[in-house]
Image (cartoon, rainbow, N blue to C red):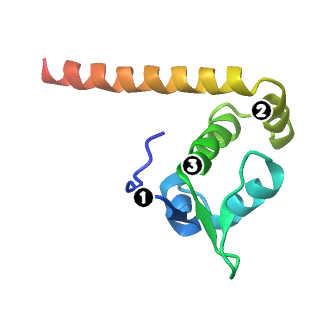
């Protein structure tokens, strides 16, 4: 998963939804379902996602959309083995990056 987000302190729900290619309603739903996802809200209730929220969203997206976990299964996985799940997610992302770089090198040969 490659996100195309500019480097800023806060992101709107629209920016995040577009980056993940999901509806904003799904992000609001995941916010209710997962305790690790807590975007800041201003006085009007507008959500502002931080870099930490983006990392957590990547992890949730990975478990639900790429690994095929149910919401309940993903929630339990995060509660029981959070650090192990994060490590596995980071390793898989590194391997995907290496794979794409190798494909790029192969294309130039």
**Where does label 3 land, which residue?**
54
Q: Which mark is residue 78?
A: 2
Could you give the CA–CA distance between mark 1 and mark 2, rounded to whole angstroms?
27 Å
Mark 2 or mark 3: whose residue is earlier in sequence = 3
Give the label, 3 or 1, closer to the camera.
Answer: 1
Q: In this view, does 99 lie to the left or right of 47?
A: left
- Along the viewing direction, whichever of 48 and 4 lies nearer the viewer: 48
- Residue 38's x, y, as percent? 72, 55
Tell me where residue 47 sits by quadrant.
bottom right
Residue 69, image x, y percentages:
76, 34
Q: In which quarter of the image is the C terminus?
A: top left
- Residue 97 image position (x, y, % from top left): 39, 26
Assign a secondary structure to mark 2.
Answer: helix
Marks 3 and 1, how far apart at CA:
12 Å
Seen as rendered, the residue at the extreme left is 109
Gap between marks 2 and 3, in whole Å? 16 Å
Out of 34 and 107, give the one closest to the viewer.
Answer: 34
Residue denoted by label 1: 8
Query: In the orientation shown, which residue stands out farthest toward the bottom?
Result: 44
Q: Residues within 10 Å of mark 3 (few under 14, many from 20)?
A: some
Residue drawn where x is 78% and y is 35% of the image: 74
* Residue 64 point in image, percent of width and height: 70, 39
Q: Residues within 10 Å of mark 1 (few under 14, many from 20)?
A: few
Q: Residue at x 45, y 19 (%)?
A: 95
Q: Is mark 3 on a helix, strand or loop?
A: helix
Quick check: 37 above or below 41? above
Q: Say which label, 1 or 2, has the lower sequence index.
A: 1
- Give the SS element for disc 1: loop
Task: Estimate how packed mark 2 is, as few (under 14), some (14 to 19) or many (20 or more) residues with alpha carbons within 10 Å.
Answer: many
In the image, which is nearer the foreground, mark 1 or mark 2?
Answer: 1
């Amino acid at each position: 998963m490659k996100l195309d987000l500019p480097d800023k302190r806060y992101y709107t729900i629209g920016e995040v939804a577009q980056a993940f290619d999901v509806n904003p309603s799904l992000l609001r739903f995941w916010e209710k379902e997962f305790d690790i996802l807590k975007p800041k809200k201003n006085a009007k209730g507008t959500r502002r996602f931080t870099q930490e929220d983006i990392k957590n969203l990547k992890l949730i997206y990975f478990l639900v959309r790429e690994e095929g976990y149910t919401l309940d299964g993903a929630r339990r996985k995060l509660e029981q083995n959070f650090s192990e799940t994060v490590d596995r997610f980071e390793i898989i992302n590194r391997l995907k990056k290496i794979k794409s770089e190798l494909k790029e090198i192969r294309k130039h040969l």
